[in-house]
Image (cartoon, rainbow, N blue to C red):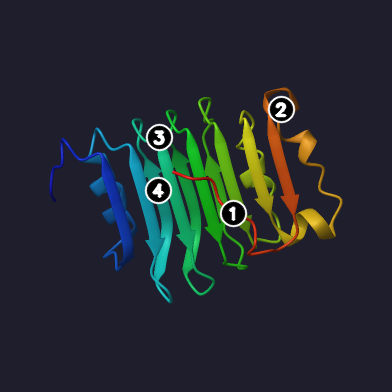
């Protein structure tokens, strides 16, 4: 395994991982990583995705609809900008640790139950949620998000016209 002590930006697009441990080990060997983009490969089976990066400030994760995953674990206490596009409608879980420094979040999630994603993002200044669940059910976002911390919110049903934050 490679050790990347000075790496600050990493973009992983269409990479085939040998195991669910591959990405975790790569990230743990990049102690100064601040900007991470992970664009998962279509028709790829991943098991559990684990992102533990204490120094990470910008994180973009794209999960295609035909990607087979069990769940996603995110521990990024320094995160400021979070972008999640999850086109996978199959049931998988999210375990996201508190992100106390989060400034902006953009969530485009097709999961039928997005509570585990929203419940993890409690303190944020700007949030955009694009989900069929938000518009088709009585999901009460205010029971999950601390409204006192929000400066701007955008809720929408499924729409590709919503622009993500600028990084």
Between residues 73 and 154, which one lies in front from this camera angle? 154
In three-dimensional space, the C-alpha distance between marks 2 and 3, rounded to whole angstroms, equals: 21 Å
Which numbered dot is residue 36?
none
Of callouts 3 and 4, which one flags the residue occurring earlier in the amino acid sequence? 4
Of callouts 2 and 3, which one flags the residue occurring earlier in the amino acid sequence? 3
In three-dimensional space, the C-alpha distance between marks 2 and 4, rounded to whole angstroms, equals: 26 Å
Residue depicted at x 29% and y 64%: 17
Residue depicted at x 65% and y 61%: 111
Question: What is the secondary structure assignment of the residue under circle 2?
Answer: loop
Of callouts 1 and 2, which one flags the residue occurring earlier in the amino acid sequence? 2
Q: Nearer the viewer, mark 3 or mark 1?
A: 1
Between residues 35 and 66, which one lies in front from this camera angle? 35
Which numbered dot is residue 57?
3
Q: Nearer the viewer, mark 3 or mark 4?
A: 3
Residue 162 is situated, as x and y percent measured from the top left of the image, at 64, 56
Residue 103 is situated, as x and y percent measured from the top left of the image, at 54, 31
Which numbered dot is residue 163?
1
Q: Residue furthest right?
A: 138
Q: Is residue 150 above or below residue 113?
A: above
Give the residue at mark 2. 146
Q: Are marks 2 and 4 in contact (CB under 8 Å)?
A: no
Q: Is residue 2 above or below residue 119?
A: below
């Amino acid at each position: 395994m490679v050790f990347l002590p000075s790496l600050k930006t990493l973009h992983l697009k269409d990479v085939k991982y040998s195991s669910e441990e591959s990405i975790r080990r790569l990230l743990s060997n990049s102690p100064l990583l601040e900007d991470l983009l992970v664009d998962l490969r279509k028709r790829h089976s991943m098991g559990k995705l684990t992102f533990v990066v204490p120094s990470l400030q910008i994180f973009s994760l794209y999960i295609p609809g035909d990607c087979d995953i069990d769940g996603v674990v995110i521990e990024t206490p320094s995160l400021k900008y979070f972008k999640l596009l999850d086109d996978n409608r199959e049931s998988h879980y999210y375990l996201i640790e508190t992100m106390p420094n989060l400034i902006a979040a953009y969530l485009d999630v097709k999961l039928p139950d997005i509570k585990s994603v929203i419940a993890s993002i409690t303190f944020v200044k700007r949030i955009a949620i694009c989900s069929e669940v938000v518009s088709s059910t009585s999901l009460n976002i205010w029971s999950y998000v601390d409204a006192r911390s929000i400066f701007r919110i955008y809720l929408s049903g499924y729409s590709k016209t919503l622009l993500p934050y600028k990084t």
